[in-house]
Amino acid sequence: MTLRYKTRIIIGSMFLGLIVILYFLSENLLLNGYGDMPGEIYDQEITIAYLMLMTVGVGLVFGIVTIFLLEKQVLSRLSRLSNSIHSIGTSGDISARVSMPGTDELSILSGTINGMLAALQQSENELRQSEEHYRLLADNARDVIYTVDLNLRFTYVSPSVTPLTGYSIEEANALTLAEVLTPASFDLALKTFAEEQAIENMAQKDLYRSQTLELELKRKDGSTVWVEARMTSLRDPDGQAIGILGVARDITERRRARQQIEHAAQEWRTTFDSISDLISIHDKDFKIVRVNKAFANAFKMKPQEVIGKTCYELVHGTKEPWPDCPHRQVLKTKKPSREEFFNSHLGIHTEVVCLPIFDEEGKVIAVVHIVRDITERKRAEEKLQELYHKEKDLRQELEEEISKRVEFTRALVHELKTPITPVMASSELLLQKLKDKPLLELAENINQGAYNLNQRIDELLDLARGEIGMLRLNPEPVDLLPLLQRIANEEMSVALHNKQSLNVELPSSLPTVWADEVRFRQVVLNLMNNALKFTPAGGKITLRAKPDGANLIVEVQDTGRGISQEEQEQLFEPYHRLERDKDRLSGLGLGLSLSKKLVELHGGQIWVKSQKGKGSTFGFSIPLEATDQGEKSVETG
């Protein structure tokens, strides 16, 4: 039965009871005998009875009106309020509102209820937004967020578990902790969980404590990944642990970097201890704070026995620092220091280098001492000084000998050329005057012999100049095409006399080069004469030239017997002649050696390509432009 009906029955019963009482009172007055009463009293009683009946009627009407008004103004509105609240409670829709117009208490009550509903709706929206916010954070975080119950079964895993382990969310939730962790990490997790359970059983405990572990996870593909797992307990309103909330972060790179740092630190310690120099670090009070093994071994102590001692006490055997102590100097100047002195305590010559160590404010907080045994170096320096003086004396003697050799060479050339000059002049005159053939042949032989002897003397002089750095070049711009053509024309008669063919393969134009024309001609003639000399009758000699990048290439090719590889290795050595050349006893073996020196003075190279029985090709290159080497040779000449 609703409150509305209860109120109706109570009010109706009250009015009905009052009417019944008044009715029976009035009936008793009207029906009971009043004959004994005086007339006036009887009339009064009758009047009272009718008044009571009228009161009953008025009360009945008033009761009906009261019930109607109560129903309309209170009970119906109260019922509507109740139904609205019940409807909201049943549907759970707190966005609905109670409609109760007016200014009475019920209207105020409905407004209060609506305010409460609005506050609840706002709180629900805020809670929903907060939950959505944290859900988005969990779903989009790179770290894996997870929860497990007290049986260590996963109850939630964030989506970031997939890129980390390769498992989907469903697969990850179905895994046990033993399936997720490697054995060593699983044992560590169980041990930590047991320790946490023991703490939970204590009366006094920190409800907000957490644990951070480094664990190795097994990935779906069989590989592993290291994570830093930070875990805290999930609790009910009474503070009892009901699960574990964890955040796992991939620390593979950090762990690799840490291992590299540890490895580097170990390498540094190994390197520090393997250095043969005596290295130590001293604080501002001259106390030793670190040493390498070499330092400790020098004093026949263990490194830990050295720590804490002062340097002047240990190294110098004194009770206070030296006035000119390099450690004190570095502390004062904040600059590195280097000193050399004989350490009587160790019995060795030492080089001491002191380097300051600064803090973040630029203050010197320590000094690195590097002590190097330079006893052997001192001995070597003394020996070097002795050798230097010897070398200086020998160089002076050599210069004197070279000067004597130069003078001797000049005198020898003069003495050789003085008698040969009139022989050459007289033989040329005889060639012009003589008509008798036998005498003419003798004159030709004398002239040719004098010419060859003069050429050998020039070669010998040039070689001597080259050996002592006095061979002179006079470089200038040279047009090589007409020069090579003239050389070929001059050698053509020799080729015809030897029944050989001389071919010239020259382009229509050649670039101008910076060279000594006389020396260039000398090199080409030497190669041409060798080719003519060692090519049999019927053979062919070819002279060619071409530009090649920044160089000009000149080659002389013949179809002679060729040169073996063993002979080629010594071909450009002075006084070296081929076996076939020795048979002819022609020349001193200086032509190719001198040609090599002349080509190199021009900044070029000379070479030979030959095979036994297949002829030879001699070639050389000179730069198209002047080189520093050539200019330097000219200056030193």
Image: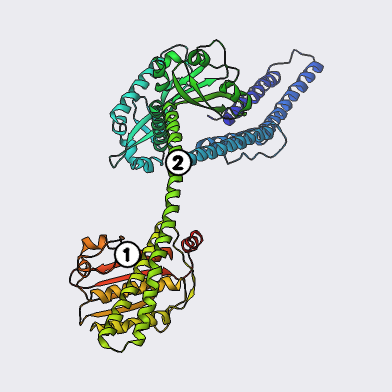
Task: Inspect the image, locate mark 1, and give the three-letter code of the amino acid beneath it.
Answer: Leu
Secondary structure at badge 1 equals loop
Find residue 299 and report its horizontal and vertical position in percent: 42, 16
In terms of depth relative to the viewer, which is nearer, 326 or 262? 326
Task: Please give left or right for residue 379 compared with residue 329 in the image.
Answer: left
512 over 337 or under it: above or below: below
- Residue situated furthest right in the rendering: 40
Residue displayed at 39% across by 79% down = 484
Q: Does any portion of residue 247 appear in the rendered image?
A: no
- Residue situated furthest top in the rendering: 319
On residue 590, the disc is 1
On residue 468, the disc is none
Secondary structure at badge 2 equals helix
Q: Crowdedness of circle 2 by 10 Å Cα count: few (<14), some, many (20+)?
A: few
Residue displayed at 33% across by 82% down = 504
Find residue 410 and report its horizontal and vertical position in percent: 43, 61
Task: Inspect the image, locate mark 2, and give the three-letter code of the amino acid beneath it.
Answer: Asp
Residues at discs 2 and 1 in contact (Cβ within 8 Å): no
Find residue 95 and report its horizontal and vertical position in percent: 58, 41
Tell me the distance, in whole angstroms, between the alpha carbons under discs 2 and 1. Answer: 33 Å
Residue 199 picture quarter: top left
Find residue 51 and report its horizontal and vertical position in percent: 76, 24
73 over 314 or under it: above or below: below
Task: Please give left or right for residue 17 compared with residue 532 in the image.
Answer: right
126 over 200 or under it: above or below: below
Q: Does any portion of residue 185 appear in the rendered image?
A: yes
Q: Earlier in the sequence, mark 2 or mark 1?
A: 2
On residue 393, the disc is 2
In terms of depth relative to the viewer, which is nearer, 502 or 99? 502
